[in-house]
Image: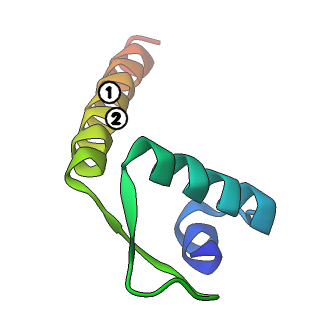
Amino acid sequence: MMEDIERFGGVRLGPGTLYGAITRLEKQGWIAPVGPRDRRQLYKLTAAGRAHLQEQLENLGRIVRIGQRRLENV
């Protein structure tokens, strides 16, 4: 997961940051573990997680569109 985040986001997260985020996402019910818990735990996005992600992406889309319009007027 850390390698994937680094590839697409250009940011290297430390294990503490990543595991803290995973814990928070799981407590919110946005992700759930898949299979037995071991060193390389797999997670899936829950229905609640998908809905929350969709909402966040729509909000970010609005911010991007506003920013692009403002740049056009500069």
Residue 8, numbered circle: none
Residue 60 versus residue 18 in the image, above or below: above
Residue 46 versus residue 53 in the image, above or below: below
SS under mark 2: helix
Q: Where on the picture, by quarter, is residue 67?
A: top left
Residue beneath the point at 49% across and 47% down: 27
How far apart are labels 1 and 2 at the CA level? 5 Å
SS under mark 1: helix
Q: Where on the picture, by quarter, is residue 13?
A: bottom right
Mark 2 neighbour class, 10 Å CA radius: few under 14, some 14 to 19, many 20 or more: few
| Place of residue 29 in the rendered image (x, y in percent of width and height, measured from the top left) | 37, 48
Inspect the image, locate mark 1, and give the three-letter code of the amino acid beneath it.
Answer: Asn
| Place of residue 26 in the rendered image (x, y in percent of width and height, measured from the top left) | 47, 54
Residue 56, numbered circle: 2
Q: Nearer the viewer, residue 16 or 4?
A: 16
Asked if the residues shown at circle 1 and circle 2 are in contact, with their CB atoms under 8 angstroms apart, the answer is: yes
Whether residue 54 is visible:
yes
| Place of residue 1 in the rendered image (x, y in percent of width and height, measured from the top left) | 56, 76
Residue 59, numbered circle: 1
Residue beneath the point at 52% across and 67% down: 8
Left or right of residue 59: residue 37: right
Mark 1 neighbour class, 10 Å CA radius: few under 14, some 14 to 19, many 20 or more: few
Left or right of residue 33: residue 61: left
